[in-house]
Image (tube, rainbow, N blue to C red):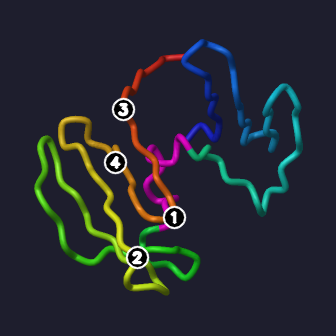
Amino acid sequence: MRLTYALSSEEGGLREECDGYNHTLTKNGRTEALPVESLVYEAHAARLAFPLALPIWGRSSDDYRLTGVAREVPDGFDLHLVHSAEARLRGTLTVSVPRRMAVRLDTPTLFVAYEDVQWSDA
């Protein structure tokens, strides 16, 4: 909801920073203006924190849709996905019940997984 994010490497260096209020993206030390109509606030690595921005809900612009099938896994469940245009392309969205969040999206065209999440009050 803050419309901002910052990504840093394991070594501690800042890799990318987005300021949604000022419509800027800083990457590799360069700041660029982002047109409002093309602004995607979440970085690829942060997409799971914005589940409604994931391309899996069957909207006209989404690549995947939910199949209605779910499977219980340790600490949560997998939601099964199918590609909107190619039914042979399938994937899963894993939701962690203890964390109350999506922790893994695995499709042939997109993979994002949270392995170590650290929260900050900053």
Residue 54 highlighted magenta (yes or no):
yes
Q: Give the secondary structure at mark 2.
A: loop
The residue to which callout 4 is attached is 102
- Mark toward the start of the polypeptide (3 vs 1): 1
Q: Amino acid at mark 4?
A: Ala
- In the picture shown, does residue 15 fall above or below 86? above
In what element is the residue under mark 1? Answer: loop
Q: Is residue 121 left or right of residue 39?
A: left
The mark that comes first in sequence, 1 or 2, is: 2
- Is the residue marked by circle 2 packed among few (<14), some (14-19), or many (20+) residues within 10 Å? some
Query: Mark 3 or 4, which is nearer the eye?
Result: 3
Q: Secondary structure at mark 4?
A: strand
Of labels 2 and 3, earlier in sequence is 2
- Residue at point 82%, 40% (across, down): 24
- Quarter of the rendering containing residue 26: top right
Q: Closer to the observer: label 2 or label 3?
A: 2
Measuring from the top left, give residue 2's x and y in whole percent: 59, 37
Quadrant of the rendered image containing residue 71? bottom left
Could you tell me how far apart the alpha carbons at marks 4 and 2 are, in whole angstroms? Answer: 20 Å
Q: Nearer the viewer, mark 4 or mark 2?
A: 2
Instruction: Provide the residue span drawn in magenta.
Output: 45-55
Observer-side mark, 4 or 1, equals 1
User: Dot 1 corresponds to which residue?
Assistant: 109
Residue at figure coordinates x 22%, y 76% from the top left? 68
Q: Element type at marker 3?
A: loop
Residue labelled with disc 2: 89
